Image: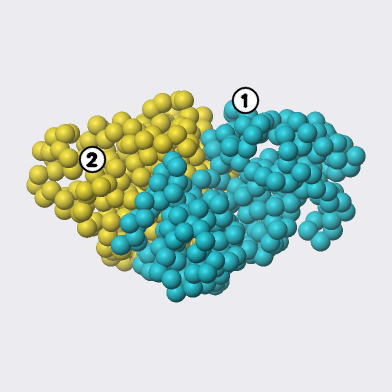
Chain colours: A yellow, B cyan
Amino acid sequence: MTYAGVELGGTKCVALLARGPGEVLERESVATTSPGETLSKLAGLLAKWRFEALGIASFGPVDLDLASPDYGHITSTPKPGWAGADVLGVLRRAADVPVAFDTDVNGAAFAEMHWGAGRGFDDFAYVTVGTGVGVGLIANGLPMRGFAHCELGHIRVARLPGDDFAGSCPYHGDCVEGLAAGPSIAARVGAERVDSLGADDPMWESVAWALAQLCHAIVCAAAPRAIAIGGGVLDKQPHLLPRIETMLVDSLNGYMTLPSDRPYIRPPELGSNAGPLGAIALAMNARR
Amino acid sequence: MTYAGVELGGTKCVALLARGPGEVLERESVATTSPGETLSKLAGLLAKWRFEALGIASFGPVDLDLASPDYGHITSTPKPGWAGADVLGVLRRAADVPVAFDTDVNGAAFAEMHWGAGRGFDDFAYVTVGTGVGVGLIANGLPMRGFAHCELGHIRVARLPGDDFAGSCPYHGDCVEGLAAGPSIAARVGAERVDSLGADDPMWESVAWALAQLCHAIVCAAAPRAIAIGGGVLDKQPHLLPRIETMLVDSLNGYMTLPSDRPYIRPPELGSNAGPLGAIALAMNARR
């Protein structure tokens, strides 16, 4: 079986033709400019390929409500021209095959579950901490999705006692994203100081705490077999992973016992391939 | 198609033989005494009936991990004799049919989604606020379940500014259950005063806030089409429902927009039938 996958990113889009993660037949990049230009280039690529299912993993937020007339569109985005762009509508016209459409984060979660940090699981979570906090939550083998996609990065959690930083989320102030994403870290200590902070800087305690509270909520919501946390912040601060796991176990306080397969909080394994492979994983699911 | 359903409760168990919610053929109650006595009486009832699938909705916590040797057992419970009881193992021997096993809360969520407050939905949440806070979360048509069942009543949420009640959960202090369940309300104002408190008592603001934060997390996790909240506390204080919805909308602050089908936060519709009908709904799902 041959699959096509398109990952739409903020600066570039990647299209793959593949039989699986180890057998990539074609790989093309297209700069993300206007939706008209970018989507027609991608549709042109797809029209030249032969495949049996298509997966699309898009930057968001996107409309994932199957009951909505705007299903498959980008919703609100600060990216010029892209608010309301009909990503699914344009790309699905390139081939008459089953199409799966989801967020880039859900796609990456799917790819990590198939071929990376969540291999062998049917219930898995993938968290990315960068300019925002994205969560891909897979339960019963499917990404969680109701009238919208998972937005657990925007829950309001209990604060680390003594942490009185107001938070940087324009919507919620001190939600997890407002307490732990890159912009909040820069606001806490000054952007120029972030890269020189030692692992023992007390600020990291506040970041680890907020992410541990997010993981506490993920465990209580869906009890995934493991949680992978990646993204720019974690890539530079790998010491956070074991600290988050310790705080999570302390926070659950024996009410729930994590699976014995440790570490429970682990790094993702697919690196920058998670995005395009996520689109392939979505395509494989569309086929089934 | 004829289904059997067993709801195991803390004081009694109810077994139904039914073709659907409007066609109950048999209904039997058995007192919950020791597991040996109770389960063999229930198995005896089931052995006399003819049905094509069995659903079991049990008080918990239960082991729902399909990979666990203790799948279908009660785990820890203060109920004498029931810790470790093999509920599924005893009852499934009564008939050679497909069997579904889940918590009473997930069963009730399922029943409300099929025939009550969530009719027509595929994504739905049911919250019960009584001696504890239970959450049944259904995504993609299935109850959320990984290595354990949903325990969102035990997340730690942001506090209402000025609410400094320590919380009554023995595990987490001020988790949602520790802030909003019956025992926490009694601890806040004195058990003898609870029933005479007016709806304008400021204490209800703290309870509504904690439940609104729970709903905020439910929406961010799974975006259900609606959330039904019932249980002893809500049954006596129906004024809380619209207050929770208002607080939820304020808390989401436009980042996510609730579906237009309102109220989003609504009462359950099945009352005390939700439990046994939940077992029937589980049986219907086992069959599919």
Identify the residue shown where x is 45% and y is 46%.
B169
Identify the residue shown where x is 41% and y is 31%.
A264
Asked if residue B202 shows in the view, the reply is yes
Disc marking residue A205 = 2
Identify the residue shown where x is 76% and y is 44%.
B31
Secondary structure beneath dot 2 equals helix
Secondary structure beneath dot 1 equals loop
The C terminus of chain B - image quarter: top right
Residue A10 location (% of width, % of height): 30, 53
Residue A206 location (% of width, % of height): 24, 44
Residue B219, above or below B80: below
Disc marking residue B277 = none
Disc marking residue B69 = 1
Asked whether the beta carbons under mark 1 and mark 2 sit within 8 Å of each other, the answer is no
Residue B28 location (% of width, % of height): 83, 48
| Amino acid type, callout 2 | Glu
Observer-nearest of B190 and B109: B190
Left or right: residue A107 compared with residue B286: left
Observer-nearest of A58 and A27: A58
The chain holding disc 2 is A
